[in-house]
Image (tube, rainbow, N blue to C red):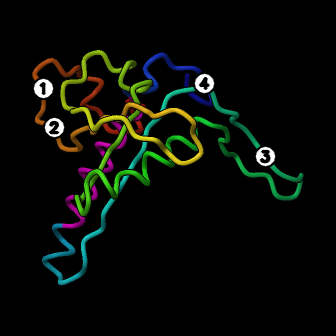
Amino acid sequence: MGAPDARPDHAAAAVRTVRRIAAALHKANEQAVEEGRPRLLLRVGIHTGPAVVGNVGALDRWNYTVVGDTVNAAERLQTLGREVAGDAEVTILASANTVAQLPGERNLRRAGEHLLRGRSDPMEVYWLDPFPAAEPAQTAAEDLPVSAAE
């Protein structure tokens, strides 16, 4: 439910953050095209569940990281994005576990059940719109810069 501190809106925070990244990437891609440089593409997988979070490794080579089945599933969703969305500028795929934590989210569509590598059961997958139209019900906190709201 969030790390290093618990937060009940962890799934919504993740979606808000990736949408802000998507907007920044889109702006950078517009400039890149104007300058004759290639566009960058982004795929993100979001899955909700338990994970081991903290410093991992030897004393002289610690890394703050996350590990576990939840992390692996998120990576598999990211990889699945290539199949589901092809060459879309930004692809956000989320598991049903994550979508269940987003009761007000309307900018999504079902992408079907997919058997992800390393999992024995199919996972229900949803595509989240990376560039949703602003909704009138947004709170002032959602309009703040990432560092202030997250």
Residue 67 lies left or right of residue 27; in this view the side is right
| Percent position of residue 134, x then y | 12, 32
Q: Which mark is residue 132?
A: 2
The residue mark sitting in front, 4 or 2, is 2
Please tell me which residue lies in front, 9 or 115.
Answer: 115
Query: What is the C-alpha distance between the residues marked 4 and 3?
Result: 18 Å
Q: Which of marks 1 and 3 is nearer the N terminus?
A: 3
Residue 133 lies left or right of residue 75; in this view the side is left
Q: Do tag 4 and tag 3 residues touch (Cβ < 8 Å)?
A: no
Q: Is residue 46 above or below residue 90?
A: above
Q: Do tag 3 and tag 2 residues touch (Cβ < 8 Å)?
A: no
| Percent position of residue 49, x then y | 56, 26
Q: Residue 56 carries which label?
A: 3
Element type at mark 3: strand
Q: Do tag 2 and tag 1 residues touch (Cβ < 8 Å)?
A: yes
Classify the position of the C terminus by image quarter. top left
Q: Give the range drawn in magenta.
A: 13-29
Residue 29 lies left or right of residue 16; in this view the side is left
Query: What is the C-alpha distance between the residues marked 3 and 2?
Result: 37 Å
Please tell me which residue lies in front, 21 or 114.
Answer: 114
**Circle 4 residues within 10 Å: few <14, some 14–19, many ≥20:** few
| Percent position of residue 98, x then y | 42, 26
Query: What is the C-alpha distance between the residues marked 1 and 3?
Result: 41 Å
Check disc 1 and give the amino acid type. Answer: Glu
Please tell me which residue lies in front, 67 or 20.
Answer: 67
Q: Residue 135 carries which label?
A: 1
Element type at mark 1: loop
Q: Which of marks 3 and 2 is nearer the N terminus?
A: 3
Quarter of the image for residue 100 reads: top left
Confirm whether the magenta stretch covers residue 58: no
Q: Mark 4 points at which residue?
A: 5
